[in-house]
Image (cartoon, rainbow, N blue to C red):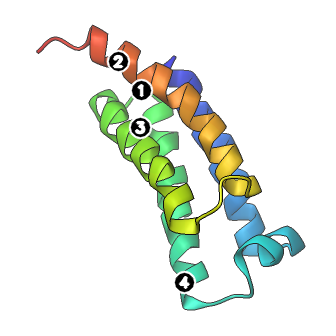
Amino acid sequence: MWVISCALNVALFSVMCIGFYANARWVRAVFGQPSPSRGTLFAIYLAALFFSLILLTGAFRSFVLPLLVFQVSSVIAMPFTLQKVRHPIVVTYLLVSIVHSISIVQLWNSTPI
């Protein structure tokens, strides 16, 4: 299941990074015009894409659980910080977080303490 989570990350972050790089219309509509804040978000998405690609190869597999926990916890905070739940980005991330949560439970149960 963790492979599905990492593949979802790669797919999602690839689309996001391509959109940010190309300054796509949908990126401007959702995230606004280019700004330092948007550039920072692009850098975060690019790092997440790169790290997810590395994890998808099976390297550093022990880092999958912390990455997914971080992603799910940040997505849970998102509706509170945006004060919106129906925003397309929030809905997409919440759906991806469901898959990530299943992966977290499976990884947690299979990890020896």
Instruction: Identify the mark nearer the N-term, 2 or 3.
Output: 3
Give the distance between the C-alpha atoms of the residues marked 2 and 3, in whole angstroms: 10 Å
In the image, is residue 54 above or below residue 40?
A: above
Judged from this view, the residue extending furthest toward the right is 25
Locate residue 61 relative to residue 102 in the image: left or right: left
In the image, is residue 77 above or below residue 83?
A: above
Q: Amino acid at mark 1?
A: Gly
Give the distance between the C-alpha atoms of the residues marked 2 and 4, in whole angstroms: 34 Å
Which residue is drawn at the image coordinates 34% and 18% (left, top)? Answer: 107
Residue holding disc 4: 37
Instruction: Identify the mark nearer the N-term, 4 or 3.
Output: 4
Instruction: Identify the mark nearer the N-term, 2 or 4.
Output: 4
**Few, some or many C-alpha atoms within 10 Å of disc 4 (few <14, some 14-19, many ≥20)?**
few
Residue 68's tag is 3
CB atoms of marks 2 and 3 within 8 Å: yes
Instruction: Please identify, in this view, whether the residue under mark 3 or under mark 1 is nearer the observer.
Output: 3
- Image coordinates of residue 88 in percent, x first then y, are 76, 54
- Image coordinates of residue 78 in percent, x first then y, are 52, 57
Q: Nearer the viewer, residue 15 or 54?
A: 15
Give the distance between the C-alpha atoms of the residues marked 1 and 4, in whole angstroms: 32 Å
**Few, some or many C-alpha atoms within 10 Å of disc 3 (few <14, some 14-19, many ≥20)?**
many
> Which element carries disc 2, helix, strand or loop?
helix
Locate residue 112 relative to residue 107 in the image: left or right: left
Locate residue 63 relative to residue 34 in the image: left or right: left
Which residue is drawn at the image coordinates 50% and 30% (left, top)? Answer: 100
Q: Is residue 72 at all visible to an observer of this figure?
A: yes
Residue holding disc 2: 107
Instruction: Please identify, in this view, whether the residue under mark 1 or under mark 4 is nearer the observer.
Output: 4
Q: Amino acid at mark 2?
A: Leu
Instruction: Identify the mark nearer the N-term, 3 or 1.
Output: 1
Residue holding disc 1: 58
Instruction: Identify the mark nearer the N-term, 1 or 2.
Output: 1
